Image (cartoon, rainbow, N blue to C red):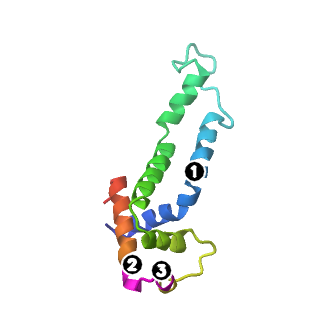
Amino acid sequence: MDKFTKQFIEKQLMDYPKMDEYIMHRRLELKYPIGQEDENIGGSSSGNISNPTERTVMTIHSDKRLTQLEKTKDAIEKVLDTLDTNAYALVELRYWTKPQTRTWVGVAKEIGYSERQCYNVRDLIIENIGKELGMA
């Protein structure tokens, strides 16, 4: 896996605690669009779905950004469910604790791993998330 893919997955892992909020916000954006323009000015039937509820459901169902957020959340959850206590603590301390004041050495001391073990566990977690996302 290349460096940029690892960085992308790490960023997704950092954002995981807010993922439900991002998903809810995107659903609301799709359900209540701002400044919806009439694309059928002076024309006949638009060919769009006339039922607003059905149109909203189709928009939400086909939105690529929402689909990607949900896919990412599911992939991270699937990998997190497989982690032991120390590996999960590593993720919490390194990615979710704000403000981030611990280095990898600090994380290693707190969970009882060596710094090298922390890097290995991190790499394995990122690799597994990448596999779940089809990126590895």
Q: Residues within 10 Å of mark 3 (few under 14, many from 20)?
A: some
Q: Nearer the viewer, residue 6 or 76?
A: 76
Question: Which range is magenta?
Answer: 107-119
Could you tell me the amino acid type at mark 1? Answer: Asp
Marks 2 and 1 sit apart, C-alpha to C-alpha, by 28 Å
Q: Main secondary structure of the magenta part?
A: helix
Helix, strand or loop at mark 3: helix
- Residue displayed at 57% across by 13% down: 44
Viewer-nearest of labels 2 and 3?
Answer: 3
Residue behind mark 3: 111
Q: Secondary structure at mark 1?
A: helix
Quickly name the residue at label 1: 20
Q: Earlier in the sequence, mark 2 or mark 1?
A: 1
Q: Residue at x 53, y 69 (%)?
A: 92
Residue 119: which disc?
2
Residue 117 is labelled as none
Q: Residue sitting at 45 percent across and 83 percent down?
A: 112
Residue 47 in view, yes or no: yes
Q: Is residue 100 above or below residue 2?
A: below
- Which corner quadrant of the image does residue 29 belong to? top right
Q: Position of residue 20 (x, y in %)?
A: 57, 50
Residue placed most toward the observer, 46 or 124: 124
Q: Amino acid at mark 2?
A: Tyr
| Label whose residue precedes the other's in the sequence (2 or 3) | 3
